[in-house]
Amino acid sequence: MNPTDVEKLIEDELEADATVSRARGKHDDDHLEATVVSTEFEDVSLVQQHQLVYDALGDHMTTDIHALELSTYTPEEYDERGE
């Protein structure tokens, strides 16, 4: 699945900013890495944050995406990273 399409799915389902790219060292579109920043992650455990992203991707997680390396942040957490 195209990384841009994955970004759109996440951003359309969650009020989020998502950056998705091919996983480092992989040359196919089914191994991806994503950084997702959303206010919906506030007061939610890391496991629940990841589940929200997986839910946004729906069946694509079992049919089009083989692996997804996820980094999830609230806007405040993301700003504190200082990158």
Image (cartoon, grey):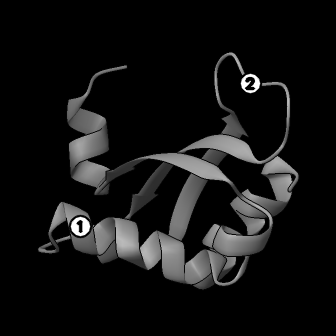
Is 54 on the left-hand or right-hand side of 43? right
Judging by the rendered image, the residue that carries numbered circle 2 is 26
> CB atoms at circles 1 and 2 under 8 Å apart?
no
- Count of numbered labels shown in the rendering: 2
Nearer to us in this view, 64 or 36: 64
Q: In front of the other: label 1 or label 2?
A: 2
Q: Position of residue 8 (x, y in %)?
A: 76, 66
Quadrant assignment for the N terminus: bottom right
Residue type at the position of mark 1: Val
Q: Position of residue 60 (x, y in %)?
A: 73, 74
Judging by the rendered image, the residue that carries numbered circle 1 is 47
Q: Residue at x 17, y 74 (%)?
A: 44
Is 56 on the left-hand or right-hand side of 72? right
Q: Residues within 10 Å of mark 1 (few under 14, many from 20)?
A: few
In the picture, residue 26 is in which quadrant? top right
Q: Residue at x 70, y 83 (%)?
A: 59
SS under mark 1? helix
Q: Residue at x 52, y 83 (%)?
A: 55
Is 22 on the left-hand or right-hand side of 2? left
Q: Position of residue 33 (x, y in %)?
A: 58, 40
State whether residue 52 appears in this view: yes
